[in-house]
Image (cartoon, rainbow, N blue to C red):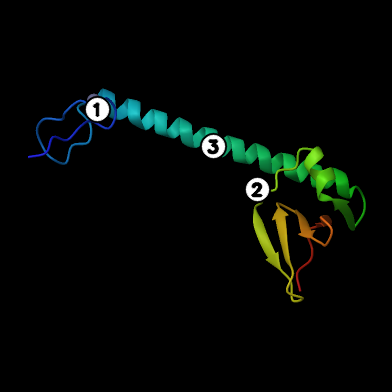
Amino acid sequence: MEDKVCLECENPIKGRSDKRFCDDACRNAYNNRRNSDHNNLTRKINNALRKNSRILEEVLGNEKMTKIQGEALRKKGFNFEYHTHHLHTSKGQTYLFIYEYGYLPLESNQYLIVKNKLEK
Ligand SMILES: [Zn+2]
């Protein structure tokens, strides 16, 4: 019979084979750590999203749409990894959105920046 080990302390577990922890203290320690990892990741992504949307807001100003070089966005700290949703237009274009601000990759590393309201 194979020895099961505790997910937290990795000591062998005695008793019922469906146990994953040796005791409540190990279970709690494991779950707390996992939750805090989850919270850290969530916070990191939320911060990146907020920053991205702030940057697009700033770039757009009072315009309906504007163009900017990808390098300029990056210099402002824009993180191209994170967005909230896609928007596909009838023209076959795909805008990436961060909340109400969206961008469309154009040629020559340019990006078209827009606010909300694009549907149809
Ligand atoms: Zn344990």
Distance of mark 3 from mark 2, alpha carbons? 14 Å
Q: Is mark 1 within 8 Å of ligand 1?
A: yes
Three-letter amino acid code at the position of disc 2: Glu
Label 3 beta carbon within 8 A of ligand 1: no
Give me the C-alpha separation between circle 3 and circle 1. Answer: 25 Å
**Relative to 61, does residue 40 appear above or below in the rendering?**
above
Rendered location of residue 9, percent (x, y)? 27, 25
Quick one: SS at disc 2? loop
Q: Name, please, the residue furthest toward the right.
A: 62
Quarter of the image where the N terminus is located: top left
Q: Which residue in the structure is indicated by mark 2?
A: 81
Crowding at dot 1, Cα within 10 Å, few <14 / some 14-19 / many 20+, comes out as few
Q: Which residue is mark 3?
A: 41
Q: Position of residue 72 (x, y in %)?
A: 85, 44
Q: Residue at x 81, y 49 (%)?
A: 70
Kindly state the secondary structure of the residue where label 1 is placed: loop
The amino acid beneath tag 3 is Leu
| Residue under pointer 1 | 10
